[in-house]
Image (cartoon, helix red, strand yellow):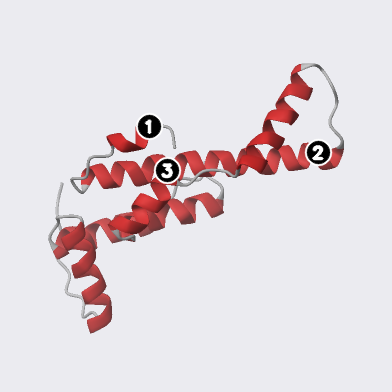
Amino acid sequence: MTNHSIVVDLPEDLYERLRRQAEQAQRTVEQQVLQAVATALSSDDSLPPDVQAAYDQLPFLSDEELWQAARMRLSSRSLERMASYNRRRGRGERLSDAQAADQQRLLHEYDRVVLLRAHAAALLKERGHDVSVLLSPP
């Protein structure tokens, strides 16, 4: 693989953000810039745009923000509604159009949370944190 060098003049505030992120991730500033460019240019068309945007932003979060992301969950009310829809469907009941739409929205949100939690945990592990505490129930 051939590497190419480029020179980019960065505003001081942007450079400082990159420097802090690199320090938190235990990378060089150059490695952090490469990560930022790779993330910005990656496109996984299989993810909905809102999920892709949130996923792409995770590497730029502080460790504290990543811990919050790794611990996020759907509300108990949302989980109860989703379970209710699943039970009804399991019994062969038909959901109303509004209920089916709500079920799809909840499934989308559930998938989003699971993906973002997993990616946040992976980034924390990459940054040297012990993420085994995330395996315990809340």
Split into 4 quadrants, where in the image is the C terminus?
top left
Please give left or right for residue 102 compared with residue 24 in the image: right
Q: Which residue type does callout 1 highlight?
A: Ser
The residue furthest top is 91
Tag on residue 117? 3
Report how far apart the C-alphas of labels 3 and 2 lie in the structure: 26 Å
Amino acid under label 3?
Answer: Arg
- Residue pointed to by mark 2: 99
From this viewpoint, is residue 17 visible?
Answer: yes
Disc assigned to residue 87: none
Q: Position of residue 39 (x, y in %)?
A: 34, 55
- Give the percent coordinates (x, y) of residue 43: 43, 50
Tag 2: Cα neighbours inside 10 Å, few (<14), some, or many (≥20)? some
Q: Is residue 122 left or right of residue 3?
A: right
- The answer to whether mark 2 and mark 1 are in CB contact below 8 A is no
| Image spot of residue 3 (x, y percent) | 14, 55
Tell which circle, 2 or 1, labels the residue nearer the N-terminal end.
2
The span from disc 1 to disc 3 (Cα, nearest Å) is: 14 Å
In this view, the residue in front, 106 or 138, is: 138
User: Where is residue 105 drawn, in percent x and y?
Assistant: 68, 44
Can you tell which quarter of the image residue 126 is in?
A: top left
Residue sitting at x 26%, y 72%: 17
Disc 2/disc 1 C-alpha distance (Å): 32 Å
For disc 1, the marked residue is 136
Disc 3 residue crowd, few under 14, some 14–19, many 20+, Cα 10 Å: many
- Rate crowding at label 1 as few (under 14), some (14 to 19) or many (20 or more) other CA atoms within 10 Å: few
- Residue at x 35%, y 53% (from the top left corner): 66
Mark 1 or mark 3, which has the lower sequence index? Answer: 3
